[in-house]
Image (tube, grey):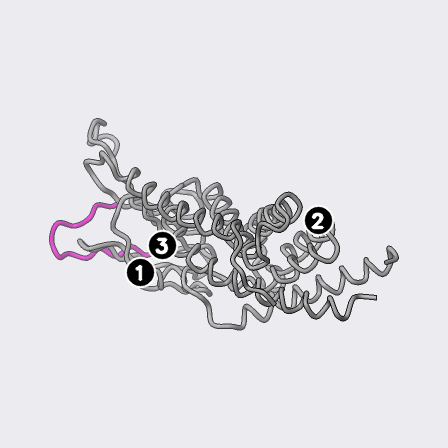
Amino acid sequence: MSKTKKMVYVALIISQALVLHYIENLLPPLPAGARLGLANIMTLITLNIFGFKEALTVTVIRSTLGPLLGGSPTAVIYSMSGGLLSCLVMSAIHYYAPGHFSLLGISTAGAVFHNIGQLLAASIVYGTAGIIFTYMPVLQFFAVLTGNFTGLAAKYILKYLKTNPLG
Amino acid sequence: MSFHIKPGDVLVYCFVLLLVGGSFFGLWSMGAGADRVRIRIELDGELVGTYDFPDDDGVTEVKVDAGAGRYNLVTITKTGVYIREANCPDQLCVKWGKILRPGQTLICLPHRVVVSITGEEDDTLDGISS
């Protein structure tokens, strides 16, 4: 695939991630600020089709623009810290433990570490570890559900792309 | 398509259980050895005030003014602290409900308000510190 073609695909994926981020804001909220993490589907797909560098690009750009679209610039800190940690962990599993995790498992690990990144960021901003301990259990409960859900979505998209590859 | 669970997946779930267990342990250790439990309200990292739990059925209400008409109404009762009302967009702080144990924290990200329960040991000069 040519460099230009790849760039266009990555740009398309970012725009799709942003639309998913926006649609998620319209859905009824989950308790404790838990999110479905639909945009994570795009990170996971990028990691599988292209690789770490492209997945990181998608994560950084969507984590910056997503909260701005939602009208809360301060949320960029939490979106970025969660997104980066999630992307790093999913990439590490993808490259260093291939075959040992299912796609749903990788996605769940991503969701779990997204929460860890966000809680760490919040506890540093507000200077209290109590935030981590209070919100961790309920957020991770939802991470297991949403991580499997987004992993399943990514699985179906990747299956489709296998028979209809990007040209 | 196969939906087999792989060994790595089990590792992920074990890690989640560890995190949940660790959080409960963290909360417990923050309250261990405390002689006196107080409520601390912060706005934008600045202390608004510290409050005691009432002994009786009294109710203390603290209105935290986050500026530009934004507020959180913190209610303190014998059985716990909760944010009764707030005009933040996500209402997460209101929906969370009551907190009671030391270490537990309520947070309103849009208004940058933090309500936490702290455990203090009685070896300090209370008359001066409070």
Dot 3 lies on which element? Answer: strand
Residue hosting label 1:
B97
* CB within 8 Å, label 3 to label 2: no
Where residue A36 appears, as percent x and y from the top left, is 52, 64
Closer-to-camera residue (A116/B16): B16
What is the count of numbered marks?
3
Disc nearest the viewer among 1 and 3: 1
Of the residues shown, which amino acid type is indicated by label 1?
Gly
For image coordinates 61% across by 45% down, the residue present is A97
Closer-to-camera residue (B47/A101): A101
Mark 3: give few (<14), some (14-19) or many (20+) Cα within 10 Å.
some
Dot 2 lies on which element? Answer: helix
Task: State the extent of the magenta-drawn residues as a range.
Answer: B50-63
Q: Is residue B53 magenta?
A: yes
- Using the numbered discs, state the Cα–Cα distance from disc 3 to disc 2 in whole angstroms: 45 Å
| Subunit under mark 3 | B
Of the residues shown, which amino acid type is indicated by label 2?
Phe
Numbered label attached to residue B64: 3
Residue hosting label 2:
A52
**The quadrant where residue B30 appears:** top left
